[in-house]
Amino acid sequence: MASNTRRTQPTNRSQGRPGTPPVLGPRALNRATLARQLLLRRDPDNRMSAKAAVEHLVGLQAQNVKPPYYALAARLHGFRPQELSAPMESREVGRMVTLRSTIHTHTAADCLALRPFAQAGGPDRELRMFLRRLDGVDLARLTALSRELLQERPRPVKELREALLAQWPDADPLALTTAARCLLPLVQTTPRGLWGRSGQVMLTTAEEWFGRPVEPAPAPDAIVRRYLAAFGPASVKDMQTWSGLSRLRDAFERLRPELLTFRDENGVELFDLPDAPRPDPDTPAPPRFLPEYDNLLLSHADRSRVVAEELKARTWKGNRALCVFLVDGFLAGLWRLEETKESATLTVRPFVKLTRAQRTAVTEEGEHLLTAMTPVTAWDVRFGDVAE
């Protein structure tokens, strides 16, 4: 990723002991991560396409249709939703279950490669939770039948479930379709996932949708480099949280000669790519509006580089993540967008009282979001009560 962000060598705060890695405080980690995430400055060279951003970020979490679009609006200059819808329609980008057994928007190449990489940390683990409800079901036969049905034509989940129940009428219906999704790399076909279009979930195999076979799982070392480029500096445990996998220490150790090492303020070892941006901790960070489940907030074991400990629980309602915004690079509150055919209202609810300058900056960023993501010309940014 090209960047004109100024890089600095972090101050060594380890009391001068020879060979002790420098310490990176929360602000240093915050600015470095924001730079990798294209959130410190939107695509600094104004050249990155939506597809290239999806690749650089190693995917965008996409339980719902709209979050990937809002994620890119926060990161790319002049982004408009069609810039992501177009490569989805042309099958250069797709939606499927990968990391942590959650739906992500990935490039076609990553759909075909990251699913095998993530298999043990997500789909396999989820499948084990349903095995007791699949007594008497031949999983090899289920896999073959599901593949045959879904490669014949894309099918809705209900239709797949009914076909599987015809073979195993005594089996748990949810367990059958969950097993098919865990055992096979399945893509949600368009128009599902397109901006402004509706459509139920229709499934087919990744091989059928992209016209080429799923690749062997890539070496963990290659994914470590990509993770650090998008989320570093980071610990082994951070990457394991992001990927859902365990036992990644060996990959980091193999790469140790070509990586830099640091410590956080708790003494945890952090790894990083030598040429990755590590801006001065005092670099200004403008406000940013992030969608629910943005990977910035989910991809580290220690999230204090963005989310203060006391605020963690306030970004969720039950098991549903809420839309959040950043001020000075850190989590600062919640937002909600209400739209009609004629107007759009963005309501901002900060966690703490904002200064006048901060309110002005948040308003300007909110206006940017409304301009990019809503077709109406009548819109408003409002500040609600402090979020509880």
Image (cartoon, grey):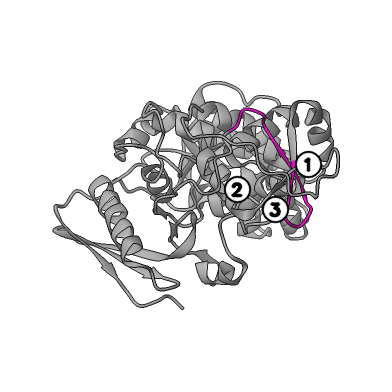
| Residue at the spot 43% in from the left edge and 54% down from the top edge | 291
Which residue was labeled with disc 3? 126
In the rendered view, tell whether residue 134 sits above or below residue 143.
Answer: below
Query: Could you classify mark 1 by the number of other residues whose Cα lies within 10 Å: few (under 14), some (14-19), or many (20 or more)?
Result: many
Give the CA distance from mark 2 to mark 1. Answer: 14 Å
| Residue at the spot 70% in from the left edge and 53% down from the top edge | 126
Between marks 1 and 3 in the image, the one whose residue lies nearer the viewer: 1
Query: Could you classify mark 2 by the number of other residues whose Cα lies within 10 Å: few (under 14), some (14-19), or many (20 or more)?
Result: many
Secondary structure beneath disc 2?
Answer: helix
- Name the mark on residue 358: none
Q: How many numbered marks, from 0 up? A: 3
* Amino acid at the residue labelled 1: Pro
Which residue was labeled with disc 2? 28
Q: Quadrant of residue 219?
A: top right
Q: Name the foreground residue: 40 vs 151.
A: 40
Between marks 2 and 3 in the image, the one whose residue lies nearer the viewer: 2
| Residue at the spot 41% in from the left edge and 28% down from the top edge | 48
Query: Could you classify mark 3 by the number of other residues whose Cα lies within 10 Å: few (under 14), some (14-19), or many (20 or more)?
Result: some
- Closer to the chain start, of discs 2 and 1, is 1
**Residue 238 falls left or right of residue 158:** right
In the rendered view, tell whether residue 381 sits above or below residue 143.
Answer: below
**Residue 318 falls left or right of residue 225:** left
Part of the protein shown in magenta: 262-276
In the rendered view, tell whether residue 206 sits above or below residue 249.
Answer: above
- Closer to the chain start, of discs 2 and 3, is 2
Tell me if label 2 and label 3 are in contact, CB under 8 Å.
no
Q: Position of residue 57 (x, y in %)?
A: 53, 37
* Amino acid at the residue labelled 2: Ala
Which residue was labeled with disc 1? 21
